[in-house]
Each structure stands twice: as C-alpha cells, then as structure tokens.
Image: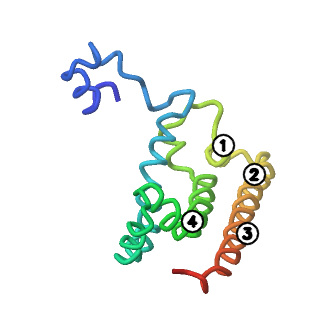
Amino acid sequence: MRRGIISTILMQLGIIKSVQEFPILTNDHDGIGIVITYIWKTLPFMTMMTLPIVFRVDKKWDSLGKLYNLSNYQFFKKIVFPLILPTLSVSFFIVLTYLFASFETPYILGVTHPRVLSVSVFDMYAKGNLDARGKIMVMNIMISAISLFFGGMISLALKFFSKFESREW
C-alpha cells in the first residue's frame, strides 16, 4: 500500500520523495501484487521441499569438490543441483496446479477485468443466475481437467525421477 511500512521506509531513506511515488501493487492491471504474493506463498514450500536434500550432501563431497578444484558454483551445478532437480520439478508442478486453481489471492488483490478463471466462476455463481449454471459447470470442469493434467504431469515426473533413485549419491 502507499501508506504501508515499505513506502514509509523508502520515503525516510530518501529513495522516494512522497508516498504517492510508491507503486500501487493491489488491483493493478499487470498483476504484480498477485505475482509477489504467490512468490511469497510458494517460496517457503519450495524451500522446505528441497532443504532435506541439501542437508543430505555429505561433508566428504565438499572435500571431494575441493580435491577436484571445484568452485562453489561448480559444486552446486555438478553435485547439489542434480540432487534437488527431481524434487524441484515435482514441487514446480504442485505449485503450478495450486496457482491455476487458486481463488483467494486473485479475488482479493486482482483487478475487476480481466479476471482469473476461478474468480469468474465464483462471481457467476454468486449472482445466482440459474441460466449461467451450465457455463459455471463447464468452467469448473475445465479447471478440474487442467488441474488433473498437471497432476498427471506430476505423476509422470515422479515416475521418471524415481528411475534414478537407485543411482543417488
């Protein structure tokens, strides 16, 4: 918000001259506030999914990386990233499915037009028009079918990456 904590701090630091210069992040046409909110919501989930795998990297691998003269970036690229890639891929599809069918964030922070599909379905349903029930059902079926498609992609990713579990470090 323009009168929030961040805008006040930026104004006190002299980065902006008045709170009116702070961009509006809610109900903006580009959906920047929605994107920031989704990043804020899904980043802890992705972190909690990958953190146990990162903790599994043994100290001896670090010594081995130093023996082969690997920089920190090369160590991450050649050892850590291949270990977390399967979990990141599955987590990505889970988050993608959640974001597609999510309702609350676009409803609260979004603009009135164009709307997200789930918000459009809710608004049509809330109006109580019996003639629109067919459209509402078709839109709900579309949301469900696309979510099931993403779920199938998750399943395929799990099957694909489970082939490599026997070759894990």
Residue at x 49% of width, y 48% of height: 38
Which residue is the site of mark 4? 85
Q: In the rendered image, which quarter is residue 161 located in?
A: bottom right
On screen, residue 113 above or below 81: above
Q: Residue furthest left?
A: 12
Q: Amino acid at mark 3?
A: Gly
Q: Earlier in the sequence, mark 3 or mark 1?
A: 1
Residue at x 44% of width, y 53% of height: 41
Circle 3/circle 2 CB separation < 8 Å:
no
Disc assigned to residue 139:
2
Give the side of residue 89 with respect to residue 169, left or right.
Answer: right
Dot 1: few (<14), some (14–19), or many (≥20) neighbours within 10 Å? some
On screen, residue 128 above or below 65: above
Disc assigned to residue 101:
none
Which residue is the site of mark 3? 152
Per the image, label 2 sits on a secondary structure element best described as helix
Per the image, label 1 sits on a secondary structure element best described as helix
Q: Quadrant of the N terminus?
A: top left
Question: In front: mark 3 or mark 1?
Answer: 3
Which residue is the site of mark 1? 120
Circle 2/circle 4 CB separation < 8 Å:
no
Q: Amino acid at mark 2?
A: Met
Cα–Cα gap, marks 2 and 1 = 9 Å
Count all numbered tags in the image, as a single digit.
Answer: 4
On screen, residue 119 above or below 144: above
Cα–Cα gap, marks 4 and 3 = 18 Å
Q: Earlier in the sequence, mark 2 or mark 4?
A: 4
State the image coordinates of residue 55 (x, y, percent, origin top left).
37, 73
